[in-house]
Every structure is written in structure tokens, then in C-alpha cells.
Image (cartoon, grey):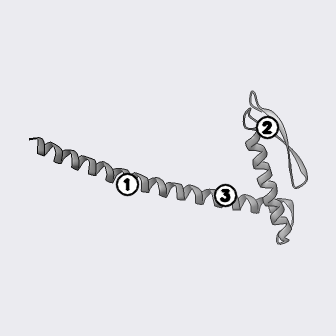
Amino acid sequence: MSKGAKTLSVNILDKEYRVACQPGEEEALLASAMELDERMRAIRQSGKIIGTERIAVMVALNMAHELLNMNREGSEGDASLERRMRNLQDKVEVALHQFNQLEL
């Protein structure tokens, strides 16, 4: 455990886990544990998957998929924003060039 970290208890599928947590990150850790617990309960209640380990793997796969999609969408948005900024910069340069031509 790193310096300054403290241990929090979280409950996931009725099991208690003690997790190291940096100061100021307690709320985020508890929210993450609640989200994980809710997703695992939903999969368990569907009855399609049996066993805590398999449920955890399915939740992890679903969350990884969501994260990758969000990153991909963010990258596409960044590329689009970059293109728009380049176009705007080009327009500004053209306008400045035309303005300079008028002053001559």
C-alpha cells in the first residue's frame, strides 16, 4: 500500500473486500464498487451466467467494451475538432492575406 493510502471496505455481491485507496478518492472508489455490484447483480438475476467468477468476467468484458467505444468516439471527436480548427486557421490566414493585399 502506498504512502497515505487507507483501506476501505466495499461490498460486492454480498462479499466484503478491503481495498487500498488514496486520500480524496474514497467517493470514486465507493461509486465504482456500487456500479460493479449493480452490474454483477443484474447479470446474476438474468440467470444466464452462473458463478461469481464468470459474472465478474462478463461485467469486466462489458465495461472494457464500453470504455473502448468511449475512447474511440473521443478520438474521432478529437480528429474532427482538429480538422475544424485547421480549416478555421486556413480561413483566418486567407482573410489576413487578403487584408494585407488591400493595405498595399
Give the camera-side residue of 104 and 61. 104
Q: Which mark is residue 64?
A: 3
Q: Is residue 99 left or right of residue 11?
A: left
Q: Which mark is residue 20?
A: 2
Quarter of the image for residue 49 reads: bottom right
Q: Residue at x 32, y 51 (%)?
A: 88
Residue linked to disc 1: 84
Q: Farthest residue toward the top?
A: 3
Q: As shown in the figure, which amino acid type bears the numbered disc 1? A: Arg
Query: Earlier along the polypeptide chain: callout 2 or callout 1?
Result: 2
Q: Which mark is residue 53?
A: none
Q: As shown in the figure, which amino acid type bears the numbered disc 3? A: Ala
**Position of the N terminus by quadrant:** top right
Q: Residue at x 82, y 72 (%)?
A: 48
Query: Earlier along the polypeptide chain: callout 3 or callout 1?
Result: 3
Marks 2, 1: nearer the viewer? 1
Packing grade of label 1 (10 A; few <14, some 14-19, many >=20) is few
Q: CA distance from mark 2 to mark 3?
A: 22 Å
Packing grade of label 2 (10 A; few <14, some 14-19, many >=20) is some
Q: As shown in the figure, which amino acid type bears the numbered disc 2? A: Ala
